[in-house]
Image: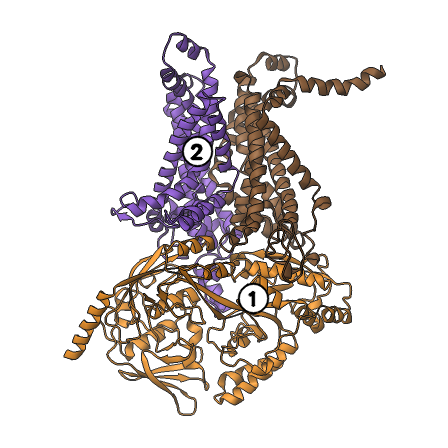
Chain colours: A brown, B purple, C orange
């Protein structure tokens, strides 16, 4: 008995190790490198307070005289030294990148989760119930596609400013970004899930479940959903990369994370102002980090798409 | 069929009304146009007077009604910023955006299909892997950064291409074109690459995955077995069958090229609708914002409609089926 | 008569021989070509090339004759008499007379005009003869000629014939897109928001004009794009150059950087009319900024030299009062700003009962002044070092002014450039108790109020004797400095960039005067 219970998790891991997905993973160097990169970046972002040399969110720790210190050199005035240099406020670039990545990842993950939940629910309902419900949902999706996400974000930003109580406005920016990016992204999920649901709902197993009197929500969640998950997973991965980039773009238009709590996108937006002035490190390091993160996630998504597509094996 | 079209057109009309309503209800949160229209020495009375001149003191439903009333007659009001009819401004700016969109759309589709087919046929070749990875870099950096880097390299450093604007344009009366002058053509290069890169990657990946799927199908195997040449198999049979989803996505992407031209246009100071819109936000030019949004909505709704109808023609099963 | 034609022909010949075109870019497109519709620097600065006033400002900002050749006070301060220049023609060929002055006065002081504030002291304007006009003032007004340097004269007949009798801000009219001035350049082509082309006016009365015969202005909003355009030679001049890029551009052989000090003073203001704080962890608690010691502590806590060194890259100067030293009425007796003193600031806070600090909200624009957001971030960090926590909220200017008008701040950033180049201007707009009826204190968002300053202002406005006037301004300055009504930080720099083959003159009000530019 004890043997079995101890072996059980191991055997699950072993089973996963032997699964087709893992096999494909082990044989794709690109997938492994990307995964490792994403893992390292996410890990260092999560542990930012432990590994970052400074806390860029603590204004009392900043010394303006440290501003524009190049990487690996000591500042003319204060003598302080920073591995990746400092920005215009005298903030350590390495620390701002680590903390910025936390915000970018948080915004990205939350936005995708939000879009996924919204998209899957509406897609399932539209596909399974059909009729007027479907028409309304899919026309709302049209309206949604009509509005450039940039604009959605700007408008939500404005509304949030108007309706949130004054004392909560400071934390608002991040949530606005999540909602704005999520709202502009759910349509893809809804379309794919609806399409798949339309196919699945006429399969025998669904008809059987209907015959034995299962309720619609149960059928949707327990029977149909698992069968439409793999395209969702692929979209979610790609969307994560897109969401992180979208946050950066919004930042360029002035509706991103605030400069006192910068995301990677905000850092790049600030950094691009120093492209011609010679302080290349303020732009270069955040851009490289963003590129590494988004590229790895994209490559993983690519690999996942091929690996999960049984027809391609 | 006619019934279906009528139904879709009616639905599109409702979509437009909703877009207008949502957009309009949000304008007051964008900011206050008054401060940009008055100078330093304005008084409180000046502010109140201008506000009532512009009708901004009216309740929101009344403002929306007035806007709709004008809009159905093709009158979108007068720009707060420029003091000219909005329809005139949009007609003046549209050619720049449409030409940019056309060139970058052409780039995206042609390069996307060519590279997509190539990477699908040579699925495991090193060149395919390289193309796939490099193309991802284009979607892993924000557009504005790509634009600025292109300017830095090709305009400032190498001095080959203009850094901003549209170059010399030829006015054809109803249309100003940059296609007829050398500077106009040179000026198109960087912005259209910046704008088209993302779409190209998307189309390329789509074509590739659809091709891979089709190439596995039995009829392709039969075609090969029949001894048809690789080229005929790949292009006559395989590519043709990947085109339905490509049409859908490309159709929707063409619309979003125009919408996302906002970023490209503001980086390259491209005198099109996107730049107009960004400036309108900056100065809270409500009539321009409203007209731009309605225009984009009409375009998206039309594209959606056309894509849906094309489906019916491309895929005969849908013609008889549930429509 | 013959000689005039001859010399005009010579001039025309010589200009065509050296025909030079010039392209320049700025951040903001002038929103109208109507000189009376909008009182903003981009509009007035641009139109100074096309239209002219009775007087104008020279390279050193001193007022000099333009359409008026001379002027003198009437009687004992009852008004001003202007003698007009003869032989001046508008761009359409019509000649300039007193009727145009009267018409332009009526148009510019009309209800829809944005510049009508300039004529508040005027009770009546009288035409004496075709080339003499009297401006009667309700009280002695020593600075009236200075205050109308941007009041531009339009042709009465032309304006009436195109139907632009009154400025129209909301719907626009012919004068929004066309211009017919007397200036050195004519408006050739106007594409709002895209580009505007000027050509030299051969019939201009003056001779102080460079060799530029055709000039094109393009607005470029993205600073990086503007710098790229200058570096690649696509434009000949940009204004402004982002401060951080100035040093790098100076190092380039093809580009030159022209630096100066602008008239604009950047300062911090406080909510002094609010009983409680509105933002931060201490929202709802009594407002510490009502205590002058707290305001003084803020002034001492800010390391202005550090801001100037890093964020302004050594291109700006410290400010001690509401105007820069270049302005008329600058108080040399009060030119010291409180020194940076962390311990002093902490001691003051402790004295005021805030030894443990407090938390409040700082509002800041992020697209109005040079590097405004970065300055506010630095201010936040410096205040944190003396123990007070500023919650920074930076926003575009389109949201900023409405927020300030609704008193949604505890502390805010403001820049002020006096339209009249006189110390009286900021005292009227920023230091007077707000009073909508008397049009006082309309930008005094923090409701600073001092009875003595309110008493001094009308006296300053009507004092003709310079020494007495300066004494009153000095007294005013002493009051607002000692009460720390505002914390002046620095005077904003002007940084323009040109190609090396361009000669031009930078005026402290950031106006680009095209006739002072030459292409070599």
Q: Which residue matches tag 2?
A: B200
Q: Nearer the viewer, residue A12 or A52?
A: A52
Q: Which residue matches tag 1?
A: C414
Alpha carbon distance from label 2 to label 1 = 46 Å
Residue at 44 percent across and 34 percent down: it is B199
Q: Is residue B68 visible?
A: no
Is residue B234 depicted above or below A233 in this figure?
above
**SS under mark 1:** strand
Tell me, yes or no, whether dots 2 and 1 are on the same chain.
no
Name the chain letter of the residue that bears numbered label 1.
Answer: C
If the image is split into quadrants, where does the N terminus of chain A sit? top right
Q: Residue furthest left?
A: C2
Residue C293 horizontal/vertical position (percent): 71, 73
Residue at 36 percent across and 47 percent down: it is B160
Q: From the viewer's perspective, is C140 left or right of A201?
A: left
Residue C224 horizontal/vertical position (percent): 46, 53
């Amino acid at each position: 008995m004890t043997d079995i219970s101890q072996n059980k998790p191991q055997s699950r891991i072993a089973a996963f190790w032997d699964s087709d997905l893992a096999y494909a993973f082990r044989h794709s160097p690109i997938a492994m490198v990307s995964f490792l990169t994403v893992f390292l970046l996410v890990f260092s972002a999560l542990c930012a307070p432990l590994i970052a040399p400074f806390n860029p969110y603590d204004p009392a720790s900043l010394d303006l005289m440290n501003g524009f210190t190049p990487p690996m050199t000591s500042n003319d005035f204060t003598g302080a030294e920073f591995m990746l240099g400092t920005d215009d406020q005298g903030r350590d670039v390495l620390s701002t990148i680590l903390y910025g990545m936390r915000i970018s990842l948080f915004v990205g993950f939350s936005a995708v989760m939000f879009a996924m939940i919204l998209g899957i629910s509406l897609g399932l309902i539209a596909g399974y119930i059909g009729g007027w419900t479907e028409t309304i949902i899919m026309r709302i999706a049209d309206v949604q596609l009509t509005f450039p996400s940039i604009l959605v974000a700007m408008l939500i930003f404005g509304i949030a400013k108007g309706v949130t109580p004054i004392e909560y406005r400071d934390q608002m920016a991040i949530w606005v970004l999540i909602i704005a990016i999520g709202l502009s992204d759910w349509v893809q999920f809804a379309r794919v899930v609806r399409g798949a649901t339309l196919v699945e709902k006429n399969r025998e197993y669904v008809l059987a479940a209907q015959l034995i009197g299962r309720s619609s929500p149960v059928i949707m969640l327990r029977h149909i959903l698992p069968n439409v998950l793999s395209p969702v997973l692929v979209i979610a991965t790609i969307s994560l990369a897109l969401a992180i980039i979208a946050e950066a773009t919004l930042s360029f238009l002035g509706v991103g994370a605030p400069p006192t709590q910068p995301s990677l996108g905000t850092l790049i937006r600030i950094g691009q102002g120093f492209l011609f002035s010679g302080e290349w490190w303020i732009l270069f390091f955040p851009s490289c980090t963003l590129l590494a993160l988004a590229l790895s996630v994209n490559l993983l998504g690519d690999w996942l798409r091929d690996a999960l597509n049984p027809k391609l094996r | 069929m006619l019934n279906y079209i009528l139904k879709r057109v009616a639905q599109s009309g409702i979509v437009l009304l909703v877009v207008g309503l949502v957009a309009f209800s949000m304008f007051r949160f964008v900011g206050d146009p008054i401060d940009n229209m008055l100078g330093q020495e304005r008084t409180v009375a000046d502010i109140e007077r201008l506000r009532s001149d512009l009708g901004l003191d009216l309740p929101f439903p009344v403002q929306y009604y007035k806007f709709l009333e004008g809009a159905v007659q093709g009158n979108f009001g007068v720009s707060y910023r420029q003091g000219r009819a909005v329809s005139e401004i949009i007609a003046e700016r549209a050619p720049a955006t449409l030409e940019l969109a056309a060139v970058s759309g052409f780039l995206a589709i042609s390069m996307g299909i060519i590279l997509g087919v190539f990477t699908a046929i040579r699925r495991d070749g090193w060149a395919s892997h390289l193309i796939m990875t490099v193309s991802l870099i284009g979607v892993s950096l924000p557009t504005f950064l790509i634009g600025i880097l292109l300017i830095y390299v090709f305009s400032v450093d190498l001095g080959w291409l203009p850094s901003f604007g549209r170059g010399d344009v030829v006015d054809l009366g109803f249309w100003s074109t940059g296609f007829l002058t050398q500077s106009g053509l040179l000026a198109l290069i960087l912005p259209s690459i910046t704008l088209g890169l993302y779409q190209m990657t998307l189309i390329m990946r789509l074509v590739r995955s659809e091709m891979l799927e089709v190439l596995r199908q039995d009829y392709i195997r039969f075609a090969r077995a029949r001894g048809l040449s690789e080229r005929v198999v790949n292009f006559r049979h395989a590519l043709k069958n990947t085109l339905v989803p490509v049409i859908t996505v490309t159709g929707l992407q063409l619309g979003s090229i125009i919408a996302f031209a906002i970023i490209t246009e503001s980086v390259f100071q491209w005198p099109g609708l996107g730049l107009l819109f960004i400036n309108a936000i900056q100065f809270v030019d409500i009539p321009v914002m409203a007209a731009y949004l309605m225009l984009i909505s009409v375009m998206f709704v039309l594209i959606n409609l056309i894509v849906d109808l094309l489906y019916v023609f491309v895929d005969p099963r849908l013609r008889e089926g549930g429509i | 008569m013959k000689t005039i034609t001859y010399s005009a022909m010579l001039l025309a010949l010589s200009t065509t021989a050296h025909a030079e075109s010039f392209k320049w870019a700025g951040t903001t497109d002038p929103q109208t070509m109507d000189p009376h519709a909008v009182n903003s620097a981009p509009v007035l600065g641009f139109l100074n090339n096309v239209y002219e006033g009775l007087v104008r400002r020279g390279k050193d900002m001193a007022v000099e004759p333009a359409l008026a050749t001379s002027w003198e006070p009437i009687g004992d301060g009852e008004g001003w008499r202007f003698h007009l220049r003869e032989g001046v023609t508008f761009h359409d060929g019509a000649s300039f007379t007193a009727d145009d002055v009267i018409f332009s006065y009526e148009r510019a002081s009309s209800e829809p005009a944005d510049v009508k504030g300039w004529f508040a002291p005027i009770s009546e304007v009288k035409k004496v003869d075709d080339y003499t006009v009297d401006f009667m003032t309700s009280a002695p007004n020593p600075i009236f000629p200075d205050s109308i340097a941007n009041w531009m004269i339009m042709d009465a007949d032309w304006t009436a014939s195109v139907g632009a009798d009154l400025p129209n801000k909301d719907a626009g009219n012919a004068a929004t897109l066309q211009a017919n001035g007397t200036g050195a350049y004519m408006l050739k082509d106007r594409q709002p928001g895209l580009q505007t082309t000027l050509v030299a006016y051969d019939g201009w009365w003056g001779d102080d004009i460079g060799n530029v015969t055709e000039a094109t202005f393009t607005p470029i909003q993205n600073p990086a794009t503007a710098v790229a355009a200058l570096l690649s030679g696509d434009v000949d001049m940009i204004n402004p150059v982002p401060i951080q890029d100035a040093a790098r551009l100076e190092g380039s052989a093809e580009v030159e950087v022209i630096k100066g000090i602008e008239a604009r003073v950047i300062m911090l203001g406080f909510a002094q009319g609010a009983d409680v704080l509105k933002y931060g962890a201490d929202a709802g608690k009594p407002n510490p900024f009502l205590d002058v010691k707290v305001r003084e502590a803020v002034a001492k806590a800010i390391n202005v030299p550090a801001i100037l060194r890093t964020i302004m890259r050594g291109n700006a100067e410290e400010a001690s009062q509401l105007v820069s030293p270049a302005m008329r009425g600058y108080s040399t007796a009060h030119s010291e700003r409180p020194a940076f003193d962390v311990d002093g600031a902490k001691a003051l806070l402790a004295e005021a009962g805030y030894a443990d600090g407090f938390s409040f909200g700082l509002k800041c624009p992020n697209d109005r002044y040079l590097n405004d957001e970065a300055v506010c971030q630095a201010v936040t960090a410096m205040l944190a070092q003396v123990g007070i926590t500023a919650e920074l909220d930076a926003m575009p200017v389109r949201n900023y002014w409405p927020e300030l008008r609704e008193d949604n701040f505890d502390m805010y950033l403001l820049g002020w450039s006096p339209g009249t180049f006189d110390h009286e201007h900021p005292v009227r707009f920023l230091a007077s108790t707000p009073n909508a009826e008397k049009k006082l204190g309309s930008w005094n968002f923090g409701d600073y109020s001092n009875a003595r300053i309110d008493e001094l202002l009308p006296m300053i406005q009507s004092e003709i004797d310079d020494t007495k006037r300066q004494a009153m301004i000095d007294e005013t300055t002493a009051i607002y400095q000692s009460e720390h009504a505002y914390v002046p930080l620095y005077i904003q720099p002007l940084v323009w960039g040109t190609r090396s083959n361009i000669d031009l003159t930078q005026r402290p009000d950031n106006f680009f005067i095209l006739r002072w530019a030459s292409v070599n």
